[in-house]
């Protein structure tokens, strides 16, 4: 299929070895200007970039920052392109806690006339302490990234959506493609909470989204939900990690308490200082990472199944 679109994304919060150029899947990441231009020119003329986006943005590329490049096929728009980047950043989070995010985002179309050039930014990503810091990624980390991407592609199917549906009486244009709630499975809904958590610097709200992620995956009813989710998470974690079940249970329950007080506008108890919130946020982030990695690699079929079979699975953990 002929490539229609090309994207250049400024990457912030990442540290690479000097003069690094790493191709992976349909991506290419580099902090080497020569490599960037060599990879860009076959798809797009830098003079055209200069004409459309201006000298300021062109000089950013020439300054040798870290950039991600990737190509897309026709019928993709800038929103879907940004979702590709968010997906890749989520896979980086599966490797280690980080605050890697996008700076400038350039969408360079080579397709339908209704899709235009686009320059914009994407949400800042914060690490589990609510901070933005540089995180080092090695070549081996990117090998793990490729493994994660390929594993997920082999285990999941593409969501099929009828984009010809009308919305409020108006036909959807190519740039308005959306995914309906009913097209999202348990995992897709759960991962949206991880995306929201990582986009938050306010720790109580970050923790609230982490808990929503766990609740989305581990709850099958609303009965005694904080106890049930905490219990199931602690048993699941202990299956793949040496962490004591009581420790994991107490952590999730404490985070439920933070979520409840934040949502209902109640003051946090005095011992939940900023330092304490950072500690439990980091620990909860680690739990969420362990959970999603072991679901995607070992338990995807179970967690994509109906509530009855999921209840049976959790009952088996109870007896193990």
Image (cartoon, helix red, strand yellow):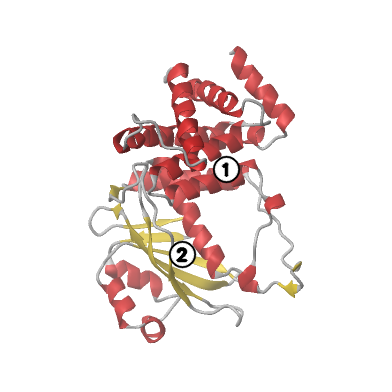
Q: Residue at x 61, y 80 (%)?
A: 114
Residue displayed at 31% across by 82% down: 55
Q: Secondary structure at mark 1?
A: helix
Element carrying mark 2: strand
Depth order, front residue of 197/63: 197
Categorize mark 2 by other alpha carbons within 10 Å: few (<14), some (14-19), many (20+).
many
Depicted 140 relative to depicted 28: above or below = above
Quadrant in which residue 306 is drawn = top right
Whether residue 72 sits left or right of residue 307 in the image: it is left
Point out which mark residue 190 bears: 1
From the image, tell me which residue sits under label 2: 70
In the displayed structure image, the side of residue 275 where residue 184 appears, left or right: right
Q: Nearer the viewer, mark 1 or mark 2?
A: 1
Residue ranking furthest to the front: 266
Farthest residue in the bottom direction?
A: 51
Above or below — where is 231 with respect to 91? above
Residue 298 percent location from the top left of the image: 57, 31
At a point 48% along the width and 71% down the height, the residue shown is 6
Judge by depth and name the residue closer to the eye, 151 or 168. 168
Of label 1 and label 2, which has the lower sequence position?
2
The x and y percentages for residue 17 are 25, 53
Q: Residues within 10 Å of mark 1 (few under 14, many from 20)?
A: many
Depicted 280 relative to depicted 113: above or below: above
**Can residue 290 be seen?**
no
- The single residue placed furthest to the left in the displayed view is 18
30 and 199: which is toward the camera:
199
Residue under the image location 60 percent in, 31 percent down: 218
């Amino acid at each position: 299929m002929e490539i229609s679109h090309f994207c250049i994304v400024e990457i912030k919060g990442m540290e690479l070895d000097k003069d690094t150029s790493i191709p992976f899947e349909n991506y290419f990441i580099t902090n080497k200007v020569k490599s960037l231009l060599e990879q860009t020119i076959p798809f797009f003329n830098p003079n055209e970039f200069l004409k459309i986006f201006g000298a300021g943005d062109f000089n950013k590329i020439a300054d040798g920052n870290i950039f991600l490049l990737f190509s897309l096929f026709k019928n993709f728009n800038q929103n879907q392109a940004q979702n590709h980047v968010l997906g890749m950043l989520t896979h980086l989070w599966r490797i280690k806690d980080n605050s890697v995010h996008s700076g400038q985002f350039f969408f360079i179309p080579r397709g339908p006339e209704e899709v235009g050039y686009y320059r914009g930014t994407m949400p800042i990503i914060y690490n589990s302490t609510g901070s933005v810091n540089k995180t080092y990624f090695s070549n081996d980390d990117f090998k793990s990234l490729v493994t994660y991407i390929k594993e997920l592609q082999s285990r999941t199917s593409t969501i099929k959506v009828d984009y010809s549906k009308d919305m409020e009486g108006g036909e959807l244009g190519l740039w308005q493609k959306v995914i309906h709630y009913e097209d999202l499975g348990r995992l897709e809904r759960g991962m949206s909470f991880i995306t929201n958590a990582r986009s938050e610097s306010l720790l109580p709200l970050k923790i609230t989204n982490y808990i929503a992620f766990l609740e989305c995956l581990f709850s099958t009813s609303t009965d005694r939900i904080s106890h049930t989710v905490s219990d199931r998470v602690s048993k699941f974690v202990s299956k793949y990690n040496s962490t004591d079940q009581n420790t994991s249970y107490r952590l999730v329950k404490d985070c439920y308490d933070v979520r409840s007080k934040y949502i209902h506008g109640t003051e946090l108890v005095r011992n939940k200082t900023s330092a304490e919130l950072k500690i439990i946020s980091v620990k909860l982030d680690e739990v969420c990472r362990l959970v999603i990695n072991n679901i995607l690699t070992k338990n995807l079929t179970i967690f994509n199944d109906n509530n009855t079979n999921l209840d049976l699975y959790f009952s088996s953990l109870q007896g193990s």
